[in-house]
Image (cartoon, rainbow, N blue to C red):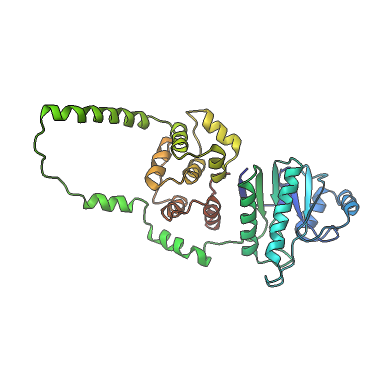
């Protein structure tokens, strides 16, 4: 189900389907298309494409994968960039959407995409990347599938991009997440005037209530990561598929966490679930501690996640785009 952004050679990847950025006649071309033909077997793949004959812009067709480590090749024709006023974005979105729908109809569980149209077709890389992430994430909100966006050349987004200026400012300040609570603590009075003594009878009922609250607090304190996670899900009236989809996690991994009270997730997985539950910083730190982790003011990865939580932005894909731009590992996946 998750989306993972990786650098590498798409022909070396193991996935049920490899997407080819094709031309209209499905003939061998350059770039990604030429590499896929060469890796799959030029003669066999050309013969399969000849039997289909044509692919319109935004559509998708399938052939056998031949020598690739995949079950199928999905061929799609992306738009040529003509300045952005000729329906290019609509056509590019159709490429991703139709490939994913075709993969679903073929009962394929994983798909690897190149960054369609960003080569000789001239689509600006940053815009092509944004369209790809947006369309794939929209599909994953409705259907489970493992999707890879495989980038071969330079990064389409970078930490120096204008949209990351506020985040860069935050990172330069090196401000830790708990600055508000630390300020509040420092402002608190050292001591308060003593309250007048209460009668023994007045003390009994509050003591019983305090004892009950203490028991509940101790029970919650002893909860494991998995137990506290499931309690958060119940308290927020969430359904589990909604949570692992928001967390960019595979259903099978979530099932392991759910079924084992002592499960020890990775820090990236734990943080992804904090984001999916839309926890505030105090709740995030508490849930992380139960998995044996902490947020560090010296970790750029931690500070980026903190920044988005403080902003109330719990979109896992936007957070992962920022982590990718800053060369940090991604949440979930």
Residue name at image x 65 percent, y 67 percent: 124
| Image spot of residue 174 (x, y percent) | 38, 57
Q: Is residue 15 visible?
A: yes
Residue name at image x 44 percent, y 50 percent: 302
| Image spot of residue 204 (x, y percent) | 17, 27
Q: Is residue 6 visible?
A: no
* Quadrant where the image shows the N terminus: top right
Can you tell which quarter of the image residue 126 is in?
bottom right
**Relative height, residue 232 to residue 85 (above, below):** above
Can you tell which quarter of the image residue 57 is in?
bottom right
Q: Is residue 284 left or right of residue 198?
A: right
| Image spot of residue 22 (x, y percent) | 79, 58
| Image spot of residue 63 (x, y percent) | 83, 48
Residue name at image x 63 percent, y 45 percent: 142
Q: Is residue 198 left or right of residue 167?
A: left
| Residue ranking furthest to the left | 196
Q: Is residue 102 left or right of residue 303?
A: right
Q: Nearer the viewer, residue 128 or 32?
A: 128
User: How many marks overall?
Assistant: 0
Residue name at image x 11 percent, y 44 percent: 193
């Amino acid at each position: 189900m998750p989306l993972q952004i990786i650098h590498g050679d798409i022909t070396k990847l193991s996935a049920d389907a490899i997407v080819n950025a094709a031309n209209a006649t499905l003939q061998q071309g350059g770039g990604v298309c030429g590499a896929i033909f060469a890796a799959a077997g030029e003669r066999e793949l050309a013969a399969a494409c000849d039997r289909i004959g044509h692919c319109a812009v935004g559509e998708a067709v399938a052939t056998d994968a031949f020598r690739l480590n995949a079950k199928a090749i999905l061929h799609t024709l992306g738009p040529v960039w003509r300045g952005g006023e000729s329906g290019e974005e609509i056509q590019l979105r159709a490429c991703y959407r139709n490939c994913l729908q075709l993969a679903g109809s073929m009962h394929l569980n994983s798909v690897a995409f190149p960054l369609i149209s960003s080569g000789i077709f001239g689509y600006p890389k940053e815009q092509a990347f944004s369209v790809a992430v947006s369309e794939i994430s929209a599909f994953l909100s409705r259907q489970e599938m493992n999707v890879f966006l495989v980038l071969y050349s330079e990064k389409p987004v970078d930490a120096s991009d204008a949209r990351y200026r506020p985040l860069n400012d935050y990172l330069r300040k090196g401000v830790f997440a708990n600055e508000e609570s630390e300020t509040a603590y420092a402002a608190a009075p050292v001591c308060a005037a003593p309250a007048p003594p209460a009668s023994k009878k007045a003390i009994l009922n509050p003591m019983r209530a305090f004892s009950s609250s203490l028991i509940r607090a101790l029970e919650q304190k002893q909860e494991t990561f998995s137990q506290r996670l499931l309690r958060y899900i119940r308290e927020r009236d969430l359904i589990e598929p909604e949570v692992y989809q928001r967390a960019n996690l595979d259903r099978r991994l979530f099932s392991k966490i759910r079924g084992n009270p002592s499960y020890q997730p990775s820090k990236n997985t734990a943080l992804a679930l904090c984001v999916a539950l839309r926890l505030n910083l105090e709740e995030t730190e508490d849930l992380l501690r139960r998995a044996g982790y902490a947020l560090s003011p010296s970790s750029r990865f931690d500070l980026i996640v903190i920044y988005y939580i403080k902003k109330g932005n719990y979109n896992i894909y936007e957070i992962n785009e920022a982590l990718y731009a800053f060369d940090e590992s991604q949440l979930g996946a």
